[in-house]
Structure formats: structure tokens, C-alpha cells
Image (cartoon, rainbow, N blue to C red):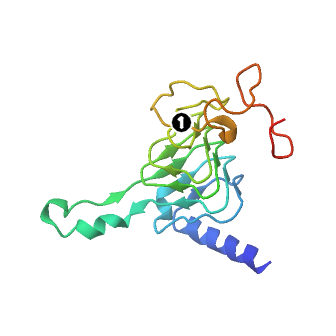
Amino acid sequence: MFTGFLQRWRLKKYIKQGLQIADDCRLVSLPNFGSEPYLISIGRHVTIASGVSFIAHDGGTWVFRDQPKYREVIRYGRIVIHDNCFIGYGSIIIPGVSIGPDAVVASGVVVTRDVPPGTVAGGAGTGPHDARGVRGEVPGGHAGVRPGGLPPGQGRRTAAGLPAPMVRGRLP
């Protein structure tokens, strides 16, 4: 009970600091909005899983900022999550990224580039996919994740070429 109160209080604090978030978003737990929540905008019907971090400012540039040629280097930018998106567990969204609409970010992904509308982003360079899992070129060339998390050529497929449905955590 106290944890729920504390999370609601922190969310209200972030909103007062400029965080833009629609009323119908689903937060599994309170994400880390970093030190600049005013640079983050979250659209309608967005689900954000536990452990997600929004990093709107990269403080790592501080290390070399005393060198004359890097004195003006400051990396920060808006993060925009459009309507009807899902952000998976433990994902990290870095400065200047736009996601969606209708996009899915897989668990544990570090999002370094824009995620085009209707795509699934994640994996280790397995190639882009649209929201139906169809492999092919996606505007912006963002890498996607193979549906069901299966490596290429593994697992049963349906007639449409999609992975067979999972039954009790295993392929039928």
C-alpha cells in the first residue's frame, strides 16, 4: 500500500516537472524518468513494463568536455513514445528517440534510433519486422526481433510463415 502511494506521488512530481503522459497509460512499475522528465512525452494507450529507463541526457560527455574541441558537446534530446506502444522489461531509451505509433520494443533493448510505426524493435540485428512479424525492409532501417524470439530457421511455423503458437511455454 505504501509503495503504491509512493509511486503515485513520484509520478505526480515528474508531471509537475514537465513529464507529458496520457491518462490511459499502463505503468507496470514506475519507470526511471531520469533527471529531465520534461523532455519525455508518452502518448495514449502505452504500456511500459518494469525496469524501463528513459535517459534524456547523457552525462557521459562530461568526461571529455574540458578538452577545447569538445567544450560545447552536450548530448540531450526529447524522447517521444507515440500512441499504442509497448515498451518491454528493462528497456533503455536514450536521448532523441521517437517510438511508434503501434510499435513494440522488446525486453532488454537499448533503443538508440527511432522505431518506425508498426514495427517490433529488439534482438541482435535479426532484421526488421513489421507488427505482424513479416520480415522485410522497414523505413528507417531499424533492426527488429524475430517473432517468438526464435533464431532463424528454428521452431515450427504456421502456413503464413509465423511461429506456431506456444502451448504451456513450449512449441507444440
Residue 14 image point, x, y percent = 57, 68
Q: What quarter of the picture does the N terminus occupy? A: bottom right
Query: How crowded is the residue under tag 1: few (<14 C-alpha within 10 Å), some, or many (20+)?
Result: some
Residue at 69% in and 64% down: 29
Residue at 54% in and 24% down: 136
Identify the residue at the far top of this view.
Answer: 159
Identify the residue at the far left of this view.
Answer: 68
The foreground one among 138 and 172 is: 172
The foreground one among 156 and 115 is: 156
Residue 102 image point, x, y percent = 63, 37
Residue 57 image point, x, y percent = 40, 62
**Kind of residue at disc 1:** Thr
Residue at 67% in and 35% down: 147
Q: Is residue 32 left or right of residue 76?
A: right
Residue 90 image point, x, y percent = 60, 58
The foreground one among 78 and 147 is: 147
The foreground one among 51 and 108 is: 108
Residue at 52% in and 56% down: 92
Residue hosting label 1: 126
**Image quarter for residue 108?**
bottom right
